[in-house]
Amino acid sequence: ILNVEQSPQSLHVQEGDSTNFTCSFPSSNFYALHWYRWETAKSPEALFVMTLNGDEKKKGRISATLNTKEGYSYLYIKGSQPEDSATYLCAFNGGGGTSYGKLTFGQGTILTVHP
Amino acid sequence: DAGITQSPRHKVTETGTPVTLRCHQTENHRYMYWYRQDPGHGLRLIHYSYGVKDTDKGEVSDGYSVSRSKTEDFLLTLESATSSQTSVYFCALRAREGMNTEAFFGQGTRLTVV
C-alpha cells in the first residue's frame, strides 16, 4: 500500500491570510504528483500536475512546489478568500509495470477561510 | 468535462444483495478508476483499468470486482453488499496519455446499504 500523507488534516484561517499544506509521498518509482481542489457537493477538480523535481506551478493565488528526492510537495494559497474553502487533495502517480496509471490520493486537507 | 457519467446517482440496497455501478465515458480514454469517499480517508482507490479487459486492484478492493469489456464502460460490482460499503463512489478517467495528465471525475454515486 502506497503511503500518501497530507498535513494538516484541517485548517482554519482568516480572510487575507496566506497558508500552506504538505503532501508526502514515496520517493521511489515517481511519475507525477497531482493536486486537486474539492468543494462540498461537487467532484474534485485538478489544480496542478507536476512531474519534475523542483517543479513550481502557479494558478492565480495558488502555487505548488515539488521535491521528488525527499518525497514532498507544498501547496500555497496567498491571501486566502472564503471561496478558497474546500478540501485539497494530493495524488501520487507512481509504480512500475501495470501500476503506471495508478493514482493514489492522500486523505486531504480541509481548508476553511473565515470572513 | 471529459464526458464521464455515473449511474445510478443514488441507490439504497439491502445487505447481501449484489450491486453494480456504471461509469460511462463518451471519448476513447484509456485509464479509468473507481474510488470511494469516506470521512477522514479522502479518496481510496478500489480498482482501476488501463485498457479493455485490463484491470488492477487498488488499496480497498476486497468485496468489489470490476469489468471493462469495452472502452467506454467501467463497471463496479459489489458482490454481496455490506453496511461497510455504504459510501460515495466516484469514477475518474485520465483524458490523455502521458504522465502529466490530470484525472476528471464523475458526479459520484451515493450508495446506502441497509
Image (cartoon, helix red, strand yellow):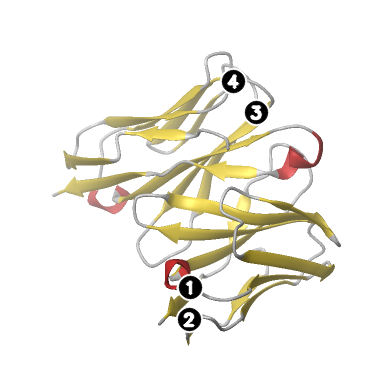
How far is mark 3 from mark 2, CA to CA? 43 Å
**Which residue appears farthest toward the front when viewing the image?**
B16
- From the image, state whether disc 4 or disc 2 is nearer to you: 2
How far is mark 4 from mark 3, CA to CA? 12 Å
How far is mark 3 from mark 1, CA to CA? 39 Å
- From the image, state whether disc 3 or disc 2 is nearer to you: 2
Q: Quadrant of residue A20?
A: top left
- Residue A83 position (above or below residue A58): below
Q: Residue at x 58, y 13 (%)?
A: A69
Q: Residue at x 63, y 65 (%)?
A: B64
Q: Which residue in the protein does label 3 denote?
A: A51
Q: Which residue in the protein does label 4 denote?
A: A27
Chain of the residue under the numbered disc 1 shown in the image: B
- Residue B85 position (above or below residue A102): below
Q: Which residue in the protein does label 2 denote?
A: B15
Q: Amino acid at mark 2?
A: Thr
Query: What label does residue A78 carry, if any?
Result: none
**Label 3 in the same subunit as label 1:** no
Q: Which residue in the protein does label 1 denote?
A: B82
In percent of width and height, residue B111 lies at 47, 76
- Residue B102 position (above or below residue A54): below
How far is mark 2 from mark 1, CA to CA? 5 Å
- From the image, state whether disc 4 or disc 3 is nearer to you: 4
Pointer 2 and pointer 1: residues touching (CB < 8 Å)?
yes
